[in-house]
């Protein structure tokens, strides 16, 4: 990551030789990101997350990225109805791992910046520089209602988010007993100690989809998460990444671009396609899918029946993540194409993380090493 190079060069997290970073996305939520009713869907208990984090750490994966959620989507499974809060989740996993980066995902309007800055430093100290911040400025209003918070209009959300991250970074800095006088945030005689690990600052990411969201991410973050175009993993994705990086350069900044995907990998392509169909098509929790779409104001009446059905299928697959389906060679080649298109990495989800990750690590990772986009993993015992 290069956005805050003067601060980040000394930081261990995500600064390794892997050309294409791979992380696990959404494991703190029940069902993960697969809107499925299958019996062995991801439970997201603490024991499962701990086992997964240690497995990923040993395999040399780069990061763990959670989803901040306060209420499920209903349906037969109450999709993502049981979730682990992301900062305490990150702190626990950082204490139990050695090299993997663990992000916390935070809705800025729900966390006071003074408290948040202290939480982040605590997690960062536990992980000795391996904590990362995924910053979100807006979310589902029914979840904000649980806090008695009404969301601001779209543009104002980012104006608030700018003050919020500015305040947090001032607390992380050498400033002491400072006042912060903003339109939205007013703080008096602020002092925050200790500071983040070794005078550095945590890696920060954002996934704003709108033009304002993208500008906010490019102005403030080290990493920007975006959806890779499904119709062309090479040229269309390459152009998409090029456009983002060009916009960042015009702002005097550099940024790494990541995407999200749902990996279904089996010994044969047919096995993978059959399992995907069983989980995501034949046993999708369509009640939850329709609730997700309704929150986005997507219905058959608003977009037409054909587009609505396409959106339903798209959403059942990891809330819209890129489907990566096939045997180990297929999956490795698809990830290679994402890397060659300029993406720095991907946050992937699995239908059942603990059951499926060993096969991914034993079969796909060595292929990525041979393709030259990842380095051979050093055993933890040798570190």
Image: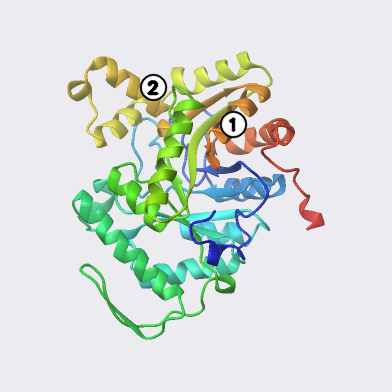
Q: Which residue is mark 2?
A: 313
Q: Is there any visible trace of residue 85 in the rendered image?
A: no
Q: Residue at x 22, y 67 (%)?
A: 184
Q: Residue furthest right?
A: 382
**What secondary structure is marked by label 1?**
helix
Most foreground residue, 19 or 170? 19
| Residue in the image at 42% along x and 69% along y | 117
Q: Position of residue 333 (x, y in %)?
A: 63, 26
User: Callout 2 environment at 10 Å: few (<14), some (14 to 19), or many (20+)?
Assistant: some
From the top left corner, tell me how far across and down residue 315 is, in percent.
38, 29
Can you tell which mark lies on residue 241?
A: none
> Height in image: 382 above or below 128?
above
Question: Residue 10: where, in percent of width, then height?
Answer: 62, 66
Q: How many numbered callouts? A: 2
272 above or below 240?
A: above
Question: Quick check: 295 left or right of 220?
Answer: left
Residue plotted at (61% across, 51% down):
50
Residue 61 quadrant: top right
Tell me residue 115's x, y (percent): 39, 71
Q: Is residue 322 visible?
A: yes
* SS at mark 2 in the image: helix
In this rendering, the answer to whether 141 lies above or below 243 is: below
Q: Is residue 76 above or below residue 277?
A: below
Residue labelled with disc 1: 335
Closer to the observer: label 2 or label 1?
A: 1
Q: Categorize mark 1 by other alpha carbons within 10 Å: few (<14), some (14-19), many (20+).
A: many
């Amino acid at each position: 990551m290069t956005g805050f190079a003067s601060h980040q060069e000394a930081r261990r997290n995500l600064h390794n030789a892997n050309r294409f970073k791979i992380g696990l996305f959404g494991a703190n939520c029940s069902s993960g990101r697969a809107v499925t009713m299958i019996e062995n869907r991801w439970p997201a208990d603490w024991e499962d997350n701990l086992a997964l984090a240690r497995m990923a750490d040993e395999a040399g994966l780069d990061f763990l990225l959670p989803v901040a959620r306060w209420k499920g989507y209903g349906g037969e499974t109450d999709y993502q109805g049981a979730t682990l809060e992301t900062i305490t989740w990150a702190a626990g996993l950082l204490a139990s791992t050695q090299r993997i980066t663990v992000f916390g995902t935070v809705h800025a309007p729900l966390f006071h910046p003074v408290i948040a800055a202290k939480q982040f430093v605590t997690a960062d100290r536990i992980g000795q520089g391996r904590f990362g911040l995924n910053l979100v400025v807006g979310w589902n209003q029914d979840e904000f209602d649980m806090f008695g918070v009404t969301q601001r209009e779209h543009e104002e959300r980012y104006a608030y988010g700018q003050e919020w991250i500015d305040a947090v970074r001032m607390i992380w800095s050498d400033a002491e007993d400072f006042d912060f006088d903003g339109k939205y945030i007013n703080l008096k005689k602020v002092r925050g100690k200790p500071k983040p690990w070794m005078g550095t600052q945590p890696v920060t990411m954002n996934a704003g989809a709108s033009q304002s969201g993208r500008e906010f991410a490019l102005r403030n973050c080290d990493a920007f998460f975006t959806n890779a175009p499904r119709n062309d993993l090479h040229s269309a994705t390459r152009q998409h990444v090029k456009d983002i990086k060009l916009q960042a350069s015009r702002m005097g900044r550099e940024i790494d671009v990541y995407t999200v995907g749902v990996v279904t990998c089996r010994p044969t392509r047919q096995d993978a396609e059959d399992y995907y169909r069983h989980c995501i098509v034949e046993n999708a929790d369509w009640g939850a899918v329709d609730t997700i779409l309704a929150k986005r104001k997507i219905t058959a009446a608003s977009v037409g029946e054909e587009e609505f059905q396409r959106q339903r299928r798209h959403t059942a697959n990891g809330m819209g993540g890129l489907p990566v389906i096939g045997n180990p060679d297929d999956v490795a080649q698809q990830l290679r194409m994402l890397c060659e298109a300029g993406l720095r990495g991907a946050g992937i989800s699995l239908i059942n993380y603990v059951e499926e990750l060993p096969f991914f690590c034993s079969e796909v990772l060595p292929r990525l090493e041979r393709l030259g986009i990842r380095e051979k993993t050093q055993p933890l015992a040798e570190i």
